[in-house]
Amino acid sequence: MASSAPATVYLVGAGPGDPELLTLRAARLIAAAGVIVHDGLVSPEVLAMARPDAQRISVAKQRSRHSMPQDEINALLVRLAREGRSVVRLKGGDPFIFGRGGEEVDACRAAGVPVEVVPGISAALGSAAQAQLPLTHRAASSAVSFVAGQCKGLTEQDWSGLAGKGRTLVIYMGVATAADIADKLIADGVAPGIPVAVLEKGTRADARVLRTLLADLGDMVAREAVKSPALIVVGEVAALANARDVMAGWAAQVERETEMRS
């Protein structure tokens, strides 16, 4: 007897956290799935939308520590689909914005497994909307770029032209390397006084929006004990955000250091 065809794997964007920001299709697929393979950034409120008997498999990734390597995640999705299970691969934000969705699509295609992608509101779009921070603005920015701040070889990456006057740079996964990011941008010619906003836990109940200047970015992240998930937005548009200005702490620190040297 011929084996049955594999089930479809759905790569679903869970958005930045607030379940009300899910697409209708995402909500329907989550509610119907027999198996949900999810990232660590998917909020408990979104996972709670699954049916009670659904199997939940966490493949959470943290800095320098992966609960399951990407190759194993790919193999898991293929195996579940071949077993005929209804699989939702649930990802924070959007599957194709730093979500490794492309790798998982490739793995499914190579194995002959049907795959569909359901977009989600990315962390940048959701967090910026909550903060009322326009990533583009006719008077302040006509271009926006997204980069990962956690990649190896940060200093060797070419970010020239991505930040500065008239441009917005959104940095994912940059909390741990915030000081290095600031040094890199300043060394590349970005003005130390350009506004910077940090969007922590965007769209969630405990979200924070903090604003300072690029020169203070590393110290501010440490001073305010910023935790992931958080985005860094560099550009004049950061001045438009509904944010708490924390430059006063930096100014006081500079004043103290000046007094100590005098």
Image (tube, helix red, strand yellow):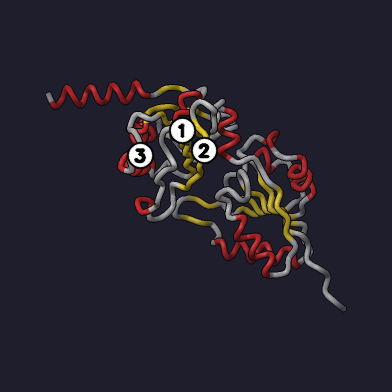
Whether residue 75 is visible to the viewer of this picture, yes or no, is: yes
Q: Residue 247: image x %, image y %?
A: 36, 24
Q: Residue 195: image x %, image y %?
A: 41, 29
**Hey, what amino acid is under mark 1?**
Gly
Secondary structure of the residue carrying numbered label 2? strand
Instruction: Find residue 4 and report its image quarter.
Output: bottom right
| Separation (CA) of disc 2 from disc 3 | 20 Å
Whether residue 36 is visible to the viewer of this picture, yes or no, is: no
Rendered residue at 64%/40% (across/down):
121
| Separation (CA) of disc 3 from disc 1 | 18 Å
| Closer-to-camera residue (72/148) | 148
Residue denoted by label 1:
166
**Hey, what amino acid is under mark 3?**
Ala
- Of pointers 3 and 1, the one earlier in the residue sequence: 1
**Nearer the observer, disc 2 or disc 3?**
2
> Is the C terminus in the top left, top right, bottom left or bottom right quadrant?
top left
Rendered residue at 62%/37% (across/down):
17
- Mark 3 neighbour density, 10 Å: few (under 14) some (14–19) many (20 or more): many
Secondary structure of the residue carrying numbered label 3? helix
| Closer-to-camera residue (153/76) | 153
Position of 85 relative to 244 (above/below) = below
**Hey, what amino acid is under mark 2?**
Ala
| Closer-to-camera residue (237/100) | 237
Secondary structure of the residue carrying numbered label 1? strand
Residue denoted by label 3:
182
> Is the N terminus in the top left, top right, bottom left or bottom right quadrant?
bottom right
Q: Could you tell me if the residues under marks 2 and 1 are in contact, i.e. CB atoms within 8 Å?
A: yes
User: In this image, 176 relative to 45: left or right?
Assistant: left
Residue denoted by label 2:
143
